[in-house]
């Protein structure tokens, strides 16, 4: 859904830290007011769009947009375009080579500004070679790259990374599946194998958001699917199962949004 025009104007006109804070406060109040009026999916997509605009503007403010060898990439849930009101914002700064001290200083200022806005961020600076190496060793990082999205910068570099993600022999489909199943089993073990806890975890409990996301991750790796709906054509889901998953997802989103 489109952001309110007032949010866009406040962000466009922002110059000082207080301006950005005022804009953020207005936006979050708008989110809360809209919660009872429209589908929650619209709102978590709206927050992702707001953060997109904020990061891209600050990328220009700190002169990072002028760096031809730099790409700003959303990953994980943020890469999917799904951000609840106070969810972490994960992004990757992809570089062709180790950045100079001057660029590192700009990156530091960029990240510090995000912290000053009280945003929970997870960020890393990697060359393509470093990203590929980390992907080999860390299935969680490999998963986050599957859901990556270029926000600004060197699109050739980004497409090269994407090609490696899908084409390299590391984490073959069956290995990826087994790794994600192992992750799920460990997650469930921490929850004692039940969703019926006094303080259930909407993300991690059996039947929670992570379990639904695991289906999507495995599908992306095995079928190269971009959406759950594509799994119907692959014979992986029936129409009825697809609709049921969507209803479950929206229900969990509603609960999580309300808790935020």
Image: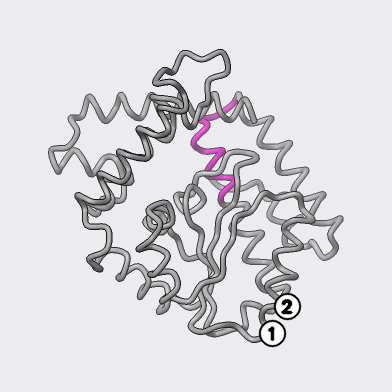
Q: Position of residue 241 (x, y in %)?
A: 24, 26
Q: Nearer the viewer, residue 206 or 20?
A: 206
Q: Which residue is mark 2?
A: 105
Q: Secondary structure at mark 1?
A: helix
Name of the residue lying farthest toward the left: 235
Q: Nearer the viewer, residue 230 or 170?
A: 170
Question: Is 6 in the magenta?
Answer: no
Does 185 appear above or below 141?
above
Question: Is 44 in the magenta?
Answer: yes
The overriding secondary structure of the stretch rendered in magenta is helix
- Please say if the residues under marks 1 and 2 sit with CB atoms less than 8 Å apart: yes
Q: Position of residue 243 (x, y in %)?
A: 29, 27
Q: Which residue is mark 1?
A: 101
Which quadrant would residue 128 be assigned to in this image? Answer: bottom left
Residue at screen point 74% across, 36% down: 29
The magenta-colored residue range is: 37-48
**Crowding at mark 1 (Cα within 10 Å: few <14, some 14-19, many 20+):** few
Does 239 appear above or below 148?
above
Q: Calculate the distance from the C-alpha at mark 1 to the C-alpha at mark 2.
A: 6 Å
What is the number of callouts on the image? 2
Q: Position of residue 23 (x, y in %)?
A: 77, 50
Residue at screen point 19% across, 49% down: 174
**Crowding at mark 2 (Cα within 10 Å: few <14, some 14-19, many 20+):** few
């Amino acid at each position: 859904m489109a952001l309110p025009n007032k949010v866009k104007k406040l962000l466009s006109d922002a110059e000082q830290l207080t301006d950005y804070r005022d804009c953020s406060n207005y936006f979050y109040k708008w989110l809360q007011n809209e919660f009872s009026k429209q589908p929650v999916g619209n709102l978590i997509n709206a927050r992702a769009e707001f953060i997109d605009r904020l990061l891209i503007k600050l990328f220009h403010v700190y002169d990072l947009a002028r760096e031809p060898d730099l790409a700003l990439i959303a990953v994980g849930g943020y890469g999917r375009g799904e951000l609840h009101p106070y969810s972490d914002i994960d992004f990757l700064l992809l570089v062709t080579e180790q950045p100079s001290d001057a660029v590192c200083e700009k990156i530091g200022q960029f990240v510090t500004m995000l912290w000053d806005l009280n945003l929970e961020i997870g960020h890393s600076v990697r060359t393509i070679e470093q990203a590929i190496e980390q992907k080999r060793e860390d299935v969680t990082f490999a998963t986050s790259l599957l859901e990556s999205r270029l926000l600004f910068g060197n699109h050739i570099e980004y497409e090269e990374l994407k090609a490696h993600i899908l084409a390299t022999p590391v984490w073959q489909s069956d290995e990826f599946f087994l790794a994600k199943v192992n992750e799920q089993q460990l997650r469930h073990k921490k929850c004692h194998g039940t969703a019926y806890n006094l303080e259930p975890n909407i993300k991690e409990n059996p039947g929670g958001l992570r379990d639904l996301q695991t289906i999507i991750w495995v599908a992306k790796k095995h079928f190269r699917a971009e959406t759950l709906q594509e799994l119907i054509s692959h014979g992986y889901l029936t129409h009825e199962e697809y609709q049921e998953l969507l209803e479950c997802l929206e229900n969990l989103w509603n609960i999580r949004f309300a808790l935020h």
